[in-house]
DNA sequence: CGTGTTTTTGACTTCAGTCAATTAAAGTGG
DNA sequence: CCACTTTAATTGACTGAAGTCAAAAACACG
């Protein structure tokens, strides 16, 4: 099996919480997967694209964003290392939003059609891919709540909690360190805030002793207070129930 | 075939843009479907439910909402007559948000498991159900943008455009009438606004001659200006390309 | 080591929130 | 059918959180 397909297989097995069956592994091995990397600011796809590609992000971070009439931008989601992106193209014709790299990023890309066929052939894999795409929708709904009903500082705290848990091997524990691969402007675009508000909110969270900041590295100091001030509950992330996860406070 | 399963079959055929094959129809006919109706304010499911049910809404309107710490509420989506609801339970264990009726509503309910089995057995149906759930996610992302980056009046105009197109036989044409089955408070909860702002924005859109209002009935007067003032493009709704749809302005 | 980007800070503004009071509408029961 | 109750819509006054703009400082990178 080539390296790309193997990474896909591992990612799928991890989500299935079991090794792939031999015939599943064989099907995954036939996927035409291409390794690519792009620079910060480069696009994986555009809002109107109908090409239908998805990928497993190996390194970096992808931003899903929309532009508005008045030139402002809203980031409607992010994809972290180890996550799939663009899975909605398996069943939809268009991409719905721009997808671009916030930092230099590498990923393993496949056409939507063979991935869909893979899911049809192996229902367990199909369900997993479906679930991954649905979780992205669940996150979007939480973001609606975040942007619609929480204060600037709470939005930021919420986002940090989410990213800490979603990032590879994520946890929300004191001392944990988290590399924020976004500029403050991009954070603002994710939270429906301006640059200034992000900066002030960050200072506020630091002043409250919830976290520390050095460059783009965040250190979580008080995870409980951080969650509370961000009104954060991990439920919507559907992280599952591995032994690791169970330690996480679920509010 | 019982009436409920037939309604499901029709809804699926409509989305597939073709009649069901006999074996597809036979599978749908075996679904254990239950007709239910609930009063305004009653819950279809709660945020933490793990029961896993989905439904085809026959009459009324469902609201998907989340509560925040400080007692406020955010509506993260709505489901209209003729749409499916709760499809994410096909692949996810929990519901993620409360689902409740905004007006007395009737629906045809099925357990998630047999619906998933149906999709596995018939890939075309599976893809359609998948697509329907993904469109809900796409809508949520647009809502993030709406709440995060648009003015109060623009948010409202955008919501009205969306509901006009999504409602049964929807179109965005002058003279078209639309029954808003939401109180102004619920509209505010959908847009991240307070009651007063909704009321004033509505007055504003009326004053600008974009629409007229009598009770909860909205009449669209100037669809083009309405779309422009709401920064609305129908792309994210994935309405497909029926002859009817093609007439819609896509911005 | 210089250039461009990002962060940080301050001053001012504004949109929408909040609160409260009033009006209108929709149900309810006698 | 009408009086009464409840809920929703409307309007005004005041407030406040965050936007905007601008400038300075810090940083990152070639």
Image (cartoon, coloured by chain):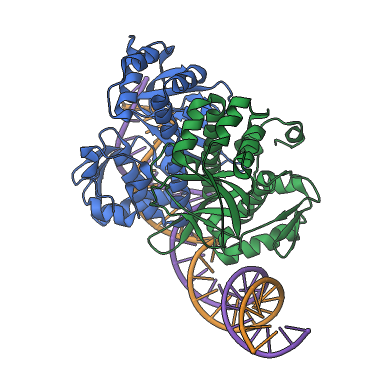
Chain colours: A blue, B green, C orange, D purple
A52 above or below A1?
A: below
State which quadrant residue A49 falls in: top right
Q: Residue at x 37, y 54 (%)?
A: A153
Q: How many marks?
A: 0
Between B174 and B101, the one lying in front of the other is B101
Q: Is residue B222 left or right of residue A57?
A: right
Residue B21: image x %, image y %?
63, 25
B123 above or below B11?
A: above
Residue B52: image x %, image y %?
43, 44
Q: Quadrant of the N terminus of chain B?
A: top right
Between B245 and D23, the one lying in front of the other is B245
Residue B219: image x %, image y %?
76, 55
Q: Residue at x 63, y 39 (%)?
A: B6
- Outermost residue to the right: B175
Q: Is residue B2 left or right of residue A89?
A: right
- Outermost residue to the left: A175
Between A94 and B168, the one lying in front of the other is B168
Q: Residue at x 33, y 9 (%)?
A: A1
Between B44 and A163, the one lying in front of the other is B44
Residue A175: image x %, image y %?
18, 44
Q: Is residue A49 visible?
A: yes
Q: Is residue A93 visible?
A: no
Q: Quadrant of the C terminus of chain B?
A: top right
Q: Residue at x 45, y 23 (%)?
A: A119
């Amino acid at each position: 099996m080539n390296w790309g397909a193997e990474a896909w297989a591992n990612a799928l097995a991890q989500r299935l919480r079991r090794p792939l069956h031999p015939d599943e592994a064989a099907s995954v091995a036939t996927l035409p997967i291409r390794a690519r990397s792009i620079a910060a600011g480069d696009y994986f796809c555009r809002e109107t694209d109908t090409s239908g590609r998805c990928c497993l992000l190996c390194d970096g971070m992808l931003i899903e964003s929309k532009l508005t009439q008045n030139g402002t931008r809203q980031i409607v989601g992010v994809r972290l290392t180890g996550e799939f992106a663009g899975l909605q193209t398996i069943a939809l014709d268009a991409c719905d939003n721009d997808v671009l790299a916030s930092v230099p990023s590498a990923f393993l890309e496949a056409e939507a059609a063979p991935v869909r066929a893979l899911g049809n052939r192996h229902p367990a894999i199909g369900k997993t891919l479906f679930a991954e795409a649905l979780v992205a929708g669940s996150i979007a709904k939480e973001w609606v709540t975040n942007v619609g009903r929480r204060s600037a500082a709470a939005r930021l705290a919420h986002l940090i909690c989410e990213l800490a848990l979603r990032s590879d091997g994520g946890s929300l524990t004191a001392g944990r360190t988290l590399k924020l691969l976004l500029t403050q402007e991009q954070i603002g675009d994710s939270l429906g805030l301006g640059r200034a508000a992000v900066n002030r909110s960050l200072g506020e969270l630091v002043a409250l002793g919830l976290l520390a900041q050095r460059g783009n590295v965040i250190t979580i100091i008080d995870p409980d207070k951080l969650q509370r001030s961000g009104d954060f509950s991990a439920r919507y992330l559907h992280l599952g129930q591995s032994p690791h996860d169970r330690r996480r406070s679920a509010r």
